[in-house]
């Protein structure tokens, strides 16, 4: 995911945000972007096959917790456990850990965000959507969260043989809000370009892919490659 400007601070909670959650939701955005670009480039009907799963480390021993009972049961400890389980591919355990963090602190935005990422990795899109909605409820001005919810809407919209225009419209609204909050977020422009490609707004799609590439830092070569190829294809279709 591209390097992003700081987003507005979420409401005060008893648990501060950790940088780890943004890394996790960044992975899901890149995964969704990759499969959406592949569908368009391949000129194929949308598929129900999941996007590439987030890269995880080799399985490791279960995370350990401190001996202090208070520390061992803190929301931060369960959150870190969830991150470790996520990295090692133990997704069911990650779900359980993030849920425990939320039980300890119902306003823990980071835990909701990473729980949504795990649900996506499991291809449980309904639960991923529900969890991101809760995170956005707690932090409504977070462009990262808004974009990730929109990306889930896009994949749901393209899961059948015919694009679900209602879902695409929902996705577009989330993307527009994310961009209004932070115009320097690159990923939303890619998502909106995908939507416009499917709805026949070729000129708008070209503009959005150009903007994505202008802001893109190249940290995800697959997304950069797909956007470049899509832009070339769209320009060729219009005789540019």
Image (cartoon, grey):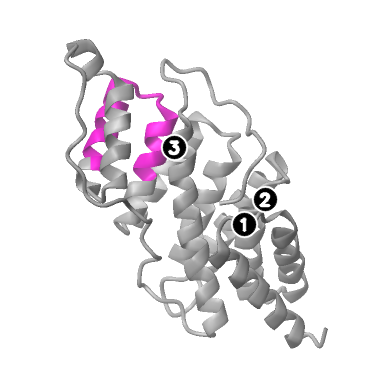
Which region is colored magenta?
94-116
Residue at image mark 1: 172
Residue at image mark 2: 176
Q: Which comes sooner in the sequence, label 1 or label 3?
A: 3
Would you place residue 178 above or below residue 14 in this image? below
**Disc sitting over residue 69 in the figure:** none
**At which x and y percent is residue 105?**
34, 21
Would you place residue 199 above or below residue 133 in this image? below
Judge whether residue 221 can be spotted in this image. Answer: yes
Cα separation between marks 1 and 2: 6 Å
Which of the pair 57/188 is nearer the observer?
57
Q: Give the number of callouts.
A: 3
Residue at image mark 3: 21
Residue found 63% across the figure and 58% down from its top: 218
The reply to whether discs 1 and 2 touch (Cβ–Cβ < 8 Å) is yes
**At which x and y percent is residue 31?**
46, 60
**At which x and y percent is residue 6?**
64, 33
Which quadrant of the figure has residue 85? top left
Q: Residues within 10 Å of mark 2 (few under 14, many from 20)?
A: some
**At which x and y percent is residue 130?**
38, 45
Residue found 29% across the figure and 37% down from its top: 82
Q: Residues within 10 Å of mark 1 (few under 14, many from 20)?
A: many
Prevalent SS, magenta region: helix
Is residue 96 found left or right of 31 in the rendered image?
Answer: left
Q: Residues within 10 Å of mark 3 (few under 14, many from 20)?
A: many
Q: Secondary structure at mark 2?
A: helix
Which of the pair 92/56 is nearer the observer?
56
Is residue 59 found left or right of 113 in the rendered image?
Answer: left
């Amino acid at each position: 995911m591209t390097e992003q400007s700081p987003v507005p601070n979420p409401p005060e909670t008893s648990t501060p945000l950790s940088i780890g959650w943004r890394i996790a939701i960044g992975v899901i955005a890149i995964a969704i972007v990759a499969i959406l670009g592949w569908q368009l480039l391949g000129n194929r009907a949308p598929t129900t096959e999941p996007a590439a799963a987030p890269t995880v480390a080799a399985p490791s021993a279960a995370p350990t917790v401190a001996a202090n009972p208070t520390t061992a049961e803190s929301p931060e400890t369960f959150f870190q456990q969830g991150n470790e389980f996520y990295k090692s591919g133990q997704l069911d355990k990650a779900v359980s850990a993030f849920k425990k963090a939320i039980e300890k602190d119902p306003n823990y935005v980071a835990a909701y965000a990473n729980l949504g990422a795990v649900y996506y990795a499991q291809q449980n899109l309904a639960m991923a959507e529900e969890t991101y909605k809760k995170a956005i409820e707690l932090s409504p001005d977070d462009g990262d969260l808004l974009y990730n919810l929109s990306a889930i809407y896009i994949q749901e919209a393209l899961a059948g043989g015919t694009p679900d225009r209602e879902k695409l419209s929902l996705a577009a609204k989330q993307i527009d809000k994310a961009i209004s909050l932070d115009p320097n977020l690159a990923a939303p422009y890619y998502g909106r370009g995908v939507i416009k490609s499917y709805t026949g707004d070729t000129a708008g799609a070209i503009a959005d892919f150009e903007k994505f590439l202008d802001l893109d830092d190249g940290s995800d070569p697959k997304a950069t490659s797909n956007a470049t190829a899509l832009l070339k294809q769209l320009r060729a279709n219009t005789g540019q």
